[in-house]
Every structure is written in structure tokens, then in C-alpha cells.
Image: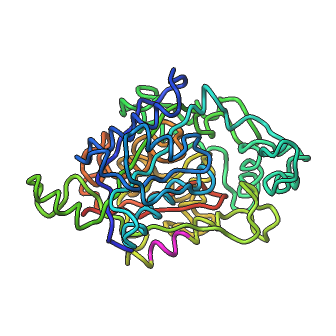
Amino acid sequence: MTGKAAIVGIGATEFSKNSGRSELRLAIECITAALADAGIAPEEVNGLLTLTMDNNGVGSVARSLGIRSVSLFAEIPGGGGGGCGTVALAAAAIEAGLADVVVCYRAMNERSQERFGLPTATYGGGGLATSAAIDRSWHAPYGLSTPASTIGMTARRYMHEYGATSEDFGRVSVASRRHAATNPKAWFYGKPITLEDHQASRMIVDPLHLLDCCQESDGGVAIVVVSAERARAAARASGAGASGAGGVLISGAAQGMGPEPVLMSNYYRDVITTTQETGIAARQLWQQSGLSAADIDVAILYDHFTPAVLMQLEALGFCGVGEAPDFIRDGAIEIDGRLPVNTHGGQLGEAYIHGFNGIAEAVRQLRGTAVNQVADARHVVVTSGSHVPTSALVLSRL
């Protein structure tokens, strides 16, 4: 699969707190934009992939787009952990000959319609003993009923083990907001923060402040995947030459799930201060691509909560376990640092679209069209949610 598929189109709606329209319309808008970006007509699409948490069924999307024949359709489990997984499945399907043009999409009114951060005793099931409800029964009775509370306990243990501080978490937020401040598409455009602002923000769940937590957003993002051969041919035909200015190569694509998984908690493992899922995906990425952390120019890391960014830096091999606080203290993850992270502002600063907007930013960096462009970016790593069954990508210039 490695190097056999490419992303050739990206599209997005605006990012807001109240879109004023249905999630299906958001999906069609971002998919239409991505296909236009790729120069591909909707009738050429024969693959549709999304997440199990997306309310837009592939049938409704196909009908609304006017697609006549679909040979690949699936939903990747979960939300945050599945984004890169849709692209991985698209690449595998194209290599296997199951589809030619695959659209991966995520569209949601997460702020105005269904807020994932609200406390819940169970995940669905109407009181029935579903597997998800049983999983939550291990920690919900003790007050761990939101994503912030489950990550908060892990973050507190990380602080205890490695001497990390709230200020270390805050540096992630400051960097993301610095990048968002110069991104006109970001919700926090023109609104940078200081470390003092972070420390002064109200406590949500100890040790997480408000500014340690990602946004809640309405919006949609879509990605178009084709074979690398087709992407190169399109680049040559457009006069871009063999470099493929419109497409980026999928050099590595992987999923990862660690031992005894329990959604966003994993408290029953011997060690809870690492994100083993990201580590499993990382080992596959480096093996597939022939690259290592040292070859990466930009990192797009899933920033649902700031401590998770530190743990992902470690799991990917940018530094050792417990060393991320030192790694970032000199501004390493800012746009002018040695490893720019979330140059679009991430989910903390741009929007929370289950990481799909991060995949789009990786494409822009490799095309050379990002607002906060990293000079001569050749390889970008992208992660999906940490502390859950997850996925990740390495994207490279075509």
C-alpha cells in the first residue's frame, strides 16, 4: 500500500458554533468543494468512507451527490481516533482495486446539535447492557463521565511521574492559538493567548483548565483519495510536472489499539502515562514509509486536550517518555521552532472536526499553500485521537 495512493482534493465548510443548516448539507458542501479542488466530477466517485459517529449515512450522501455506482462504503469505528483510518482504508482499497476515487468525510453540528463534552452515564443502548455502557461502568460511577475527566486523571498521573506542570500543558495551547491567530479560517483568528491567559482560565477538571480543552464546532471537511499514478498524471496534465503540486503521497497509514482498551481511560494498564495506541500506529508508519521522526518537517497532532499532545510527541519518537515538557519549553512546536505542530491552530484554535481539518492542513503544507507555511516541508505526520483506538498518517510530497 505504501506510496500507492495520494490525496488530491480537500474541501471544508466554514467553522462555526451554529451552522444554521443540516449535517447532511454540511457534508455535501465540503465534499463538493473537495471534488472541485481535485478536478473530479461527483459521478466518478465510487467510494465513500466516514466515521460511525457521523450522522450522514453513505446512502444519503451518495444520493445527494448524484453518485450512480458505489463499490466501496464503510464507517470507521469511533470519532476522534478514526479520521486518519478512513484515509488508510481508502488507500488500501485503491491498491486492492476496490475503488478508484474515494471520498472521506466528516460533517457535524457538534456545538449546536450534539455536544460530546456533556456528562453521560452510558453511551446509548437505552439502558441496555451494551458493550460501551459496560465499559463506562468501570469509571462513570466515580465521576469520570466526560472526556475531560478521563483525560484529566491521566494528565495528573503524568505530572506526578515526570514532573510536568500545568504551564507545560499551557505551552501547547499558546502555540496553537498563535497559529490560529493568523489563520482566517480559524475560529480564534486574531485571538492569540499568553501563558498567563491559560493559567487564569477556569478549571474544568483538575488539572485541565478551559484553555487545555479543544473547542466544540459545527462544520465539515472532506478528503479525496486516488491512486498515486492518477495523481501524477493529473499533475503532469495540469503543467505542474512530476512533482504533483495538487496531490500528496500517502507514505504511511496505520491504525492502533493497545491492550485492554477502554475508551479514553485505560486505567487498568500497568502504565497509564503513555498513549500506547499512537505508539502502535507510529511503529507501522515508520516501517511502511522508511522514515523516522527525524525526517518529519511538520506534525499535526490530535489536540483534544493539551496533555495528549505531549504524550503523542513521545509515542511518535520525537523525544523520550516523560521528556516532552523539556522538548517544547523553548518554543519547539511553534511555527518558527524545530518541529512546528498544528500550524492551522489545531482543534484548540481552528475547529474541532474530529481531526479531519488537520489532515487538510497537512495537505496544504505539502502543497506549499498553508497560511503558516513551513519552508520546504516534505513529510508531515498526522495523528487521530489519543487514548482511544486510533490511526495516523505520514504524507509526503508526490
Q: Residue at coordinates 37% horizontally, 78% vertically from top-left?
A: 290
Q: Position of residue 198 (x, y in %)?
A: 60, 34
Q: Quadrant of the N terminus?
A: bottom left
In the picture as drawn, the residue positioned furthest to the left comes out as: 239
Rendered image quadrant of residue 241: bottom left
Image side of residue 298 versus residue 60, left or right: left
Q: Position of residue 385 (x, y in %)?
A: 59, 54
Q: Residue at coordinates 53% horizontally, 57% vertically from top-left?
A: 74
User: Between residues 192 and 150, which one lies in front from this camera angle?
Assistant: 150
In the picture as drawn, the residue positioned furthest to the top comes out as: 20
Q: Residue at coordinates 33% horizontally, 66% vertically from top-left?
A: 5
Q: Quadrant of the C terminus?
A: bottom left
Magenta segment's dominant SS is helix
Image side of residue 146 versus residue 242, left or right: right
Rendered image quadrant of residue 271: bottom right
Residue 355's place in the image compared with 317, above or below, is: above
User: Between residues 186 and 94, which one lies in front from this camera angle?
Assistant: 94
Image side of residue 182 versus residue 276, left or right: left
In the image, the segment drawn in magenta is 281-286
Q: Residue at coordinates 34% horizontally, 38% vertically from top-left?
A: 32
In the picture as drawn, the residue positioned furthest to the right comes out as: 141
Is residue 283 rendered magenta in the image? yes
Number of numbered labels in the structure image: 0
Image side of residue 1 versus residue 166, left or right: left
Q: Position of residue 331 (x, y in %)?
A: 45, 49
Is residue 293 rendered magenta in the image? no
Rendered image quadrant of residue 208: top right
Q: How is the image coloured?
A: rainbow
Q: Position of residue 195 (x, y in %)?
A: 56, 36
Residue 372's place in the image compared with 271, above or below, is: above
